[in-house]
C-alpha cells in the first residue's frame, strides 16, 4: 500500500484549461481564486510558441485571471534556458510575436536552429537555411512537436511536421523542450521547492499534460474542456492519476471545479472503466467545449 503523498504544487495548463483563445472557460476564474486559497504553490505551464510571456499575461489578466508573470512557464522559456545553457546562437523559426522572449540572445551567424509555430517562416528558403545549418552541426531544438492545432476555421499544421521534416532530411533528432518532455515539467517546478511526487498537473491534453506529468513523476488530472473532446485517442493509453477527494479537497473541492471523481466509476475501483475512460476536474458551469486550443 503506497503512502499518501502531500500535495504542495499545482501546475495548471492555460489554453484549453483556463481559456480558449480570447475567451475564458466559464467558471475558471473562480476555480483559480479558490485554488489560491489552498496552501499550494501554483504555476501555469503552456506550450505556446506564438506569443511572448508578456502578451500571454496581458491576455490572461484581461480575461480576469489573477496571475503573475513569474508564475508562468512556457515552452519558449524552456527553449531560452536551453540556448543559454548551450551558449549557442539560434536561427529562430518562431512567430515574430514570440521574439521578445529571446531578447538578449545573440542570433548573428547562427549555430543552432529553434523551431516553433512560425507559419510566416515555414517556406523553402528558410527551411533550407535551417537544413544546411543542421548539416553543419547546429543542434535542432523544437519548442514542441504538435502535429496540428485547432483554429476557428479548422485544423492547421503545427510545428511537428516541420521539425520532423528537418530531422528526416538531416538524419538527426531534435531536442524537444515543451510538453510532454520530462525536463519541461521539472523546469516548471524549479524554484517551488517541491518534488515531482508532491505536484499535480491539470490540463486538457491527455498525452502532453497528463502523460507528460506522469512520466516526470507527478500526478495528472484531465479536465473536460479544450482538447478533451476533439482528441481522445491518447485516452486509450494514458490514464489520469487517481487522486482521492481528501487529497485535493482543501484545494479544489470548495471551488466551482467539480471533482468528477465524486461521481465517476474510476474512483470507485472500477478498473475497466479506469482503462477506457479518463476523468479529472470539470468546471461545473462549463459546457464541454468542442473548440480546440490553438496550442496546448
Ligand atoms: Mg491545453
Image: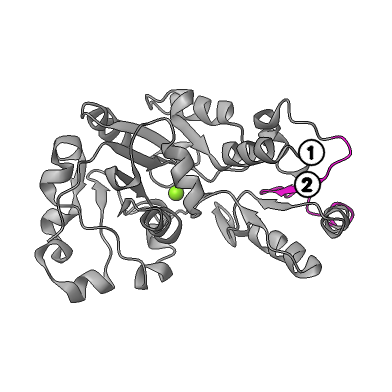
Name the quarter where the N terminus is drawn: bottom left
Residue 240 showing in the rendered view: yes
Mark 2 vs 1, N-terminal side? 1
Q: Badge 1 is on which residue? A: 89
Tell whether position 166 is magenta: no
Q: Badge 2 is on which residue? A: 112
Residue drawn at point x = 73 percent, y = 25 percent: 104
- The answer to the question of whether label 2 and label 1 lie on touching residues, with beta carbons closer than 8 A, is yes
Q: Residues within 10 Å of mark 1 (few under 14, many from 20)?
A: some
> Does the Cβ of the disc 2 residue fall within 8 Å of ligand 1?
no
Residue 35: x %, y % from top left:
25, 32
Residue 208: x %, y % from top left:
46, 56
How far apart are labels 2 and 1 at the CA level?
6 Å
Residue drawn at point x = 48 percent, y = 40 percent: 187
Residue drawn at point x = 26 percent, y = 32 percent: 40
Give the residues drawn in magenta, as a range.
Answer: 108-127
Residue 15 showing in the rendered view: no
> Does the Cβ of the disc 1 residue fall within 8 Å of ligand 1?
no
Q: Quadrant of residue 31?
A: top left
Direction from residue 188 to residue 285 in the image, left or right: left
Residue 184: x %, y % from top left:
50, 46
Residue 270: x %, y % from top left:
13, 71
Q: Quadrant of residue 39?
A: top left
Q: Residues within 10 Å of mark 2 (few under 14, many from 20)?
A: many
Residue in the foreground of this view, choosing between 135 and 117 = 135
Amino acid at each position: 500500500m503506497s503512502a499518501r503523498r502531500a500535495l504542495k504544487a499545482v501546475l495548471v495548463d492555460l489554453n484549453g484549461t483556463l481559456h480558449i483563445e480570447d475567451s475564458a472557460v466559464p467558471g475558471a476564474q473562480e476555480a483559480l481564486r479558490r485554488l489560491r486559497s489552498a496552501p499550494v504553490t501554483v504555476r501555469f505551464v503552456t506550450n505556446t510558441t506564438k506569443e511572448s510571456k508578456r502578451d500571454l499575461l496581458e491576455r490572461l489578466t484581461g480575461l480576469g485571471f489573477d496571475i503573475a508573470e513569474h508564475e508562468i512557464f512556457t515552452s519558449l522559456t524552456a527553449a531560452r534556458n536551453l540556448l543559454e545553457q548551450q551558449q549557442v546562437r539560434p536561427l529562430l523559426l518562431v512567430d515574430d510575436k514570440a521574439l521578445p522572449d529571446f531578447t538578449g540572445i545573440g542570433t548573428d551567424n547562427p549555430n543552432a536552429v529553434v523551431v516553433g509555430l512560425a507559419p510566416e517562416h515555414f517556406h523553402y528558403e528558410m527551411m533550407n537555411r535551417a537544413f544546411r545549418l543542421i548539416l553543419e552541426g547546429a543542434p535542432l531544438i523544437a519548442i514542441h512537436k504538435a502535429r496540428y492545432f485547432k483554429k476557428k476555421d479548422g485544423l492547421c499544421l503545427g510545428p511537428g511536421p516541420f521539425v520532423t521534416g528537418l530531422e528526416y532530411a538531416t538524419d538527426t533528432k531534435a531536442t524537444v523542450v515543451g510538453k510532454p518532455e520530462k525536463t519541461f515539467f521539472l523546469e516548471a517546478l524549479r524554484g517551488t521547492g517541491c518534488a515531482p511526487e508532491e505536484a499535480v498537473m491539470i490540463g486538457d491534453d491527455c498525452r502532453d499534460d497528463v502523460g507528460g506529468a506522469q512520466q516526470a513523476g507527478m500526478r495528472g488530472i484531465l479536465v473536460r474542456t479544450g482538447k478533451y473532446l476533439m482528441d481522445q485517442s491518447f485516452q486509450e493509453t494514458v490514464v489520469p492519476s487517481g487522486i482521492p477527494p481528501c487529497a485535493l479537497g482543501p484545494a479544489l473541492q470548495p471551488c466551482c471545479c467539480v471533482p468528477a471523481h465524486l461521481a465517476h466509476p474510476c474512483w470507485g475501483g472500477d478498473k475497466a472503466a479506469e482503462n477506457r475512460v479518463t476523468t479529472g476536474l470539470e468546471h461545473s458551469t462549463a459546457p464541454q467545449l468542442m473548440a480546440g486550443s490553438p496550442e496546448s
